[in-house]
Image (tube, rainbow, N blue to C red):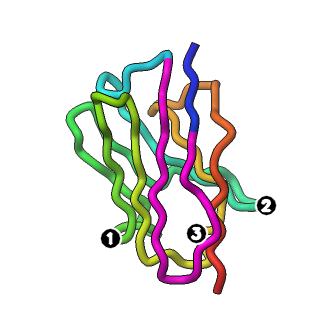
Amino acid sequence: QVQLVESGGGLVQTGGSLRLSCAASGVIVRFKSMGWYRQAPGKQRERVALITIGSATNYADSVKGRFTVSRDNAKNAVYLQMNSLKPEDTAVYYCNTEPTNSNWGQGTQVTVSS
């Protein structure tokens, strides 16, 4: 069974940085495209970053140039480096395979204060 555990969120001021981690079990991340998703209060969940099996990356326009997704095959983990954070980045962040697996993790809260 796929299990995804996100960590690294927190409270940060505008312009700050955070690095999110996603530890995976039941799935080998180097054999999957992996995405980072976020859901803000009252909004639908959206994908913000994707890393493919071939390590190509893709970003939502709202985070392009500020977020970087990466993968550590040895640790079976995926990361999201978030720089120049804005209040509109406030959300719960999740990782998942792409296409998504039904077993979403608990997510990690990111709060950016103005």
Asked if disc 1 and disc 3 are in contact, CB closer than 8 Å, the reply is: no
Q: Residue at x 47, y 31 (%)?
A: 97
**Mark 3 Cα-neighbour bin, 10 Å: few <14, some 14–19, many ≥20:** many
Indicate the position of residue 18 as horizontal and vertical percent values: 48, 64
**Mark 1 Cα-neighbour bin, 10 Å: few <14, some 14–19, many ≥20:** few
Decide: is 35 above or below 17.
Answer: above
The local secondary structure at tag 1 comes to loop
Residue range (magenta): 6-25
Q: Quadrant of residue 61?
A: bottom left
Quadrant showing the C terminus = bottom right
Report the predominant secondary structure element of the magenta stretch. strand
Kindly identify the amino acid type of the residue bearing the numbered disc 1.
Gly
Left or right of residue 68, residue 103 in this image: right
**Which residue carries the number 3 mark?**
89
Outermost residue to the right: 42
Kindly identify the amino acid type of the residue bearing the numbered disc 2.
Gly
Picture disc at residue 103: none
Asked if disc 2 and disc 3 are in contact, CB closer than 8 Å, the reply is: no
Picture disc at residue 65: 1
Picture disc at residue 42: 2
